[in-house]
Amino acid sequence: MTFNPDIHHRKSIRLKGFDYSGAAAYFITICTLNREHLFGEIVDGVMCLNSMGDIVNDSWQWLAGQYTHVHLDQWIIMPDHLHGIIMIRDGMGGSRTAPTATNAKTKSIGRLVGAFKTVSTKNINRLRNTEGARLWQRNYWERIIRDDAELAQIRQYILDNPLRWSCRGGS
């Protein structure tokens, strides 16, 4: 086997020069480690959350309560992933930003997803008595939502996700 130093270097999907902490809307997908079905099940086209799914839901909503510049739009928690729309508004950075800063940066989308993963993992590990266990896959998928038509399309995609899951037997 030949050593390939680039094997662990992923190609960035980030837009060059885009401020990922600036006001924008993002479509986010976060998957469980090994796509393990942990958060509930789809019954007749409806996602039914279990206790771990409830924790993920509470942790997702925590973002908007913790960071005043975050607005959560449509989201769905599936057995092995979460789809959500996060809107970052202009404003202060949240819990760790000094309120006296006049031009404080908001948390970037990556830092927000990281905070969500930390909070949800900690609470689920407490429930399962699995301190230090990984819950989520490394990284996440994101797309900057560019206009109202795309926003409407993504909202519908999120709403329809449990129906597509049922039709395909999971995905």
Image: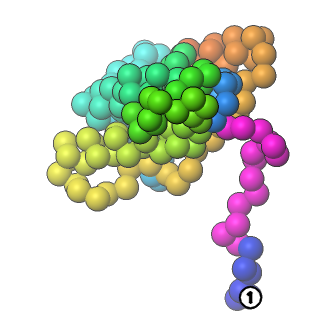
Task: Tell whether 116 sits left or right of 71.
Answer: left
- Residue 19 position within the rendered picture, expressed as x and y whole percent measured from the top left: 72, 38
Q: In the picture, residue 74 is in which quadrant?
A: top right
Question: Tell me, what colour scheme is on the image?
Answer: rainbow
Which residue carries the number 1 mark?
A: 2
The answer to whether any part of residue 73 appears in the image is yes
Residue 149 drawn in magenta: no
What main secondary structure does the magenta stretch of the protein show? loop
Q: In this image, 148 relative to 171: left or right?
A: right
Secondary structure beneath dot 1 equals loop
Q: Residue at x 77, y 39 (%)?
A: 18
Q: Position of residue 107 (x, y in %)?
A: 54, 37
Q: Between 168 and 50, which is closer to the camera in this rendering?
A: 50
Determine the residue positioned at 52% across, 27% down: 92
Is 2 left, or right, of 40 in this rendering?
right
Q: Quadrant of the N terminus?
A: bottom right
Give the answer, above or below, for where 153 lies relative to 128. Answer: above
Q: Is residue 9 magenta?
A: yes
Residue that protrudes farthest toward the right in the picture: 16
User: Residues in magenta?
Assistant: 7-20
Q: Position of residue 5 (x, y in %)?
A: 72, 80
In the displayed structure, does residue 49 sit left or right of residue 36? left
Q: In the rendered image, is residue 31 in sight? A: no
Task: Choose top left, top right, bottom left or bottom right for residue 117.
Answer: top left
Count neighbours of disc 1 (C-alpha within 10 A) and say few if under 14, some if 14 to 19, many if 20 or more.
few
- Give above or below for 161 relative to 59: above
Residue at the image point whose x is 76% and y is 57% from the top: 11
**The residue under label 1 is which amino acid type?**
Thr
- Quick one: 105 or 126, which is closer to the camera? 105
Residue at x-position 41% and y-position 39%: 96
